[in-house]
Amino acid sequence: MLTKQDIIDKALELGFDDIGFTNAEVFNEHKPFLQKTPNNYTWAAASGLQLEEGCNPVTILPQAKSIVVLLQNYYKYDFPKSMEPFFGRCYMDDDRVTRDGLTIKIKQFIAFLRDDGIKTKTPFHLPQKAAAARAGIGTFGKNCLLYANNTARKSSWINPVTIVIDKEYEPGKPTVAIGCPDWCRNACIAACPTRALKGNCTIDSQRCISYLTYYASDITPYELREPMGLSVYGCDRCQDVCPRNKAWMSQVLPINERVVTKAPYFDLVKLLHMDEKYFLHYIWAHMFYTPATDMWRWKMNVARAMGNSSDDRFVPELIAAFNNNNDPRVQGMIAWALGTIGGVRAKDALHGFRAGASDAVLHEIERALDSLHHY
Ligand code: SF4
Ligand code: SF4
């Protein structure tokens, strides 16, 4: 039978950044957390993930004895400046659909265990951050993220991967705690643009920009449009301001060539005008939470980011997109974006949009025109 050291050595040989072990006991402390804020997890239920069930490893693998937790640092390479302001870092090289990066390593690791007769399951709904803390390889931040204990300069730029196995290994010493220094006066909470962070590792996820960019069911509420800034998909603000992340972020890192290759496809103008074929060919496999049937959300997000950019280069693009879209959420956000960028061209276009506009879009047009009365 493989020793614990054999398994650790294999994980490091494959390029994982850290590995820990915990037992297969129920994550009892996590259940009340899920029950207290059920609205935060409606997205998970809609995706078929039963998070409460995932708190009990035996429901995942009946013979469960241990959980192996692997950590992968997803920010070893820098990201192109043409993408970084608009997309969360953890999504820019996400291979969960393309399965050509981290997935290959996970498969190799699982094959190594199975070759020794160990049964494995790799669940998505087990509380992965809680498992990492119980395995002693991470602590929590008040921004609800996991921070590494031994790798990535103790930062939060890590993905935990959990594998439930049917063999018992000595568990690590738990570090289930908030690891934030007292002298940090809740920088993440103060910096969160939409006031989603509520303190002590709690979040109103439906106010979080990440959630809003890929799961929102309607046009972004008016009061959140400006705070959402340039975000098109995801948000890193509470990590960028965190002093626990500064040591990692102070490095000059080599560029991520995989992301450089795809960056031209994520140009805002191309995203605003993309059709379904383009979306499915170039975008969806990399950032897949929004299906093609909800492409309106991408376009709305891009229009909002363009408005917040104050870049009048986008005005003709927004005008063309208004005329080529009939979704009121996209048209409404385009009207808002034109009102935010401003200028005579934007004002004239908004006047022209009035004819034939639906009530909801007309409301956005009139509000945008009100903000342009000085032109
Ligand atoms: S990801 Fe952005 S919006 Fe969400 S909690 Fe962090 S700072 Fe706030
Ligand atoms: S910003 Fe401060 S409070 Fe927030 S996670 Fe970082 S150290 Fe903790």
Image (cartoon, rainbow, N blue to C red):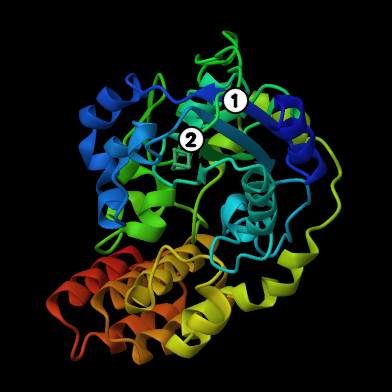
Res. 372 image quadrant:
bottom left
Label total for image = 2
Q: Is residue 176 above or below residue 235?
A: above
Residue that sits furthest to the top in the current view? 182
Residue 293 location, x and y as percent?
Answer: 32, 78
Name which residue type carries label 1: Phe
In the rendering, which numbered label is found on residue 248?
none
Quickly name the residue at label 1: 21
Mark 2 vs mark 1, foreground winner is: 1
- Give the position of the N terminus as an image quadrant: top right
Residue at (34% x, 19% y) in the render: 29
Q: Tell me: 115 left or right of 372.
A: right
Label 2 – label 1 distance at C-alpha: 12 Å
The mark nearer the N terminus, 2 or 1, is 1
- In terms of depth relative to the viewer, which is nearer, 62 or 260? 62
Q: Identify the amino acid type marked 2.
A: Gln
Q: Are marks 2 and 1 in contact (CB under 8 Å)?
A: no
* Viewer-nearest residue: 36 or 47: 47
For image coordinates 55% across by 84% down, the residue present is: 281
- Vertical placement of residue 76 versus 198, above or below: below
Q: Work out whether 156 lies above or below 331.
A: above
Q: Residue at x 49, y 59 (%)?
A: 233
- Residue 267 x/y as whole percent: 61, 75
Residue at 49% over, 63% down? 305
Q: Which residue is mark 2?
A: 128
**Image position of 291 (left or right of 81):** left
